[in-house]
Amino acid sequence: MNLTTHIRLMAAAAAVAGSYAAADACTSLIATPGATADRSSMVTYAADSHTLYGALYHQPAAEHAAGAMRPVVEWDSGHLLGEIPEVANTISTIGNMNEHGVTIAESTWGGRHELAGSGLIDYGSLIYITLQRAKTAREALDIMIGLVNEYGYASEGESFSIADPNEVWIMELIGKGKADKGAVWVARRVPDGYISGHANHARIHTFPLNDPETLYAPDVIDFARSQGYYDGPDEEFDFSRAYAVTDIGAVRGCDGRVWSYFNRFSPKGEMDKYLPWILEAKGEPLPLWVKPENPVSANDLKWMMRDHFEGTPLDMTQDIGAGAFDVPYRWRPLTYTVDGKEYTHERAIATQQTGFSFVSSMNAERPEAMKSVLWFGVDDANTCVYVPVFNSALTVPKSLDEATADLLTLSWDSMFWVNNYVANQAYNRYSQMIPDIRKVQLPLEAEMEAAVAQAATELAGKPYGEAQLVLNTLTEKCAANTTADYKKLGDYLFVKYLDGNIKKERDGQFERTADGMPVQPDWGGYNERYFRSIVDEQGDHFLIVEPEANK
């Protein structure tokens, strides 16, 4: 949802980053340097919303006069909440990353609704104000806590991933209700060598009370007691159970996404013991972090963002909801009632209503101008192409600029709309179309990954400004090529699969007869499960019976 014109102008003048829409269901996955193949810190994010246009937001560094004020615009609604004093110098940001390589991602878990904050700083503003001020993850953590303490918190329960090239923290925070503008929170550093994540449910359960790698609000336990949320000893206090709502939606629909991540990189079968927690909210809660069996890469995390629980008991391509073409998507609402009983579809990381997603790779060993690479994609992570964006970015490519289009205005110059053109065709006949999508998607990403690796070598020792220009041009080129190639892909899918047919091809061209007519196409038909479902429901209604006259 775009901000109104007067809010946009006010925000731009005061260096507020772009316009946003409500992030209805987000996922953030984490990998620490010791858990990655190249010793990078990595954070992913999917901004899922039914009203979010996927774009890349950039705010240049700026100097501000004494007494300057910064408008605080609520991320979800575009409402102007108020103003706070601006700092003298703000840092350049690109997406959810800044020029120093700090990345912040989030997922909303809501929690106890009576604790919705009444302060000035909403969760989105908390992220983007902090990115304009912080040079390290720890500094970002201090700034976020300071902003909430001074101005109050205006949102519900939230989890944040806060990272730089050296470390990653998870902070979970919730307000104190309308009578108190403050907030209670816990922050834990993810141990090096481990992976973690959150996806709309509070993940911090019990935590050490005397550990320099664990920080918390002084009254986080006492406040829970005062509200009747907890009455046990301090050392057994469970933040998630006290402040969040632990129901089947939270564990199956939210922790389930994190379980799939852990399951992918853990020894086979190790995560099975947590299935009772995921499927029934019983047994031992999912741990906050696990040690992966093998180091993960940025490419691994791109594919994790494309996950639909493939190969697990929750595999969305295998149940009847996948239909005749093994479609791993379910239209909302996710819950439904049959004969008075309530059921749910699975809720995977990859989903059709993603506005944008990214994999941020932060590594101080790379040249300063590219020490952080934001692999950025728009629309469904499963079908998008992740384009490299660098911490030194100067501009936003036209195809990723919010000014190019919006959710109600189609434009073939917009990567978001071009990806939707491809993805929404595949949702109808997924098993048939996804191989053709991969044939374009995979080479594009491989080419860009090679270009980034080459740039890291060639720019070593080059002046920052020179490297900055090279990298900015690289991003522009990658975005332009991806948008053009995906438009061609969408056209190709439309022609090839027209009217339920599958046109034959030879040497990259659709086949014609010697007379120039189209060759008779293949008929794609349906899968075996589809036919069996008809027979199971209709019995012999469609059975072919030999006419009596022919017997």
Image (tube, grey):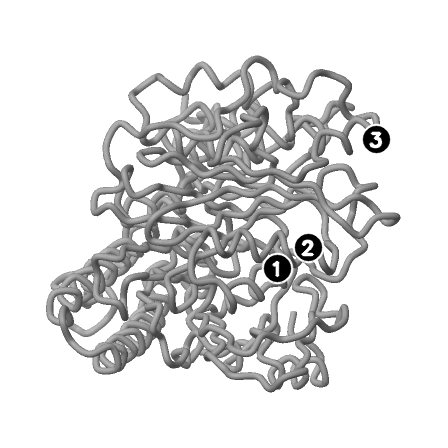
| Mark pair 3, 2: CA separation | 20 Å
Residue drawn where x is 36% and y is 44% of the image: 431
With respect to residue 491, does 318 lie above or below? above
| Mark pair 3, 1: CA separation | 26 Å
The answer to whether 161 appears left or right of 261 in the picture is right
Please tell me the numbered disc located at residue 227: 3
Answer with the quarter of the image where residue 16 lies: bottom right
Identity of the amino acid at label 3? Answer: Gln
Does the residue at mark 3 contact the one at mark 2 (Cβ under 8 Å)? Answer: no
Q: Is residue 96 visible?
A: yes
| Mark pair 2, 1: CA separation | 8 Å
- Residue on which the image places disc 2: 148
With respect to residue 496, does 35 lie above or below? above
Answer with the quarter of the image where residue 111 lies: top right
- Residue on which the image places disc 1: 126
Looking at the rendered image, the quarter that the C terminus falls into is top left
Mark toward the start of the polypeptide (3 vs 1): 1
Residue drawn where x is 48% and y is 25% of the image: 287
Looking at the rendered image, the quarter that the N terminus falls into is bottom right
Identity of the amino acid at label 2? Answer: Val
**Residue 236 at x, y percent in the picture:** 63, 18
Neighbourhood count class around disc 1 (C-alpha, 10 Å): few under 14, some 14–19, many 20 upward: many
- For this rendering, which residue is in front, 181 or 455? 181
Does the residue at mark 2 contact the one at mark 1 (Cβ under 8 Å)? Answer: yes
Identity of the amino acid at label 1? Answer: Leu
The kind of secondary structure element at disc 3 is: loop
Neighbourhood count class around disc 3 (C-alpha, 10 Å): few under 14, some 14–19, many 20 upward: few
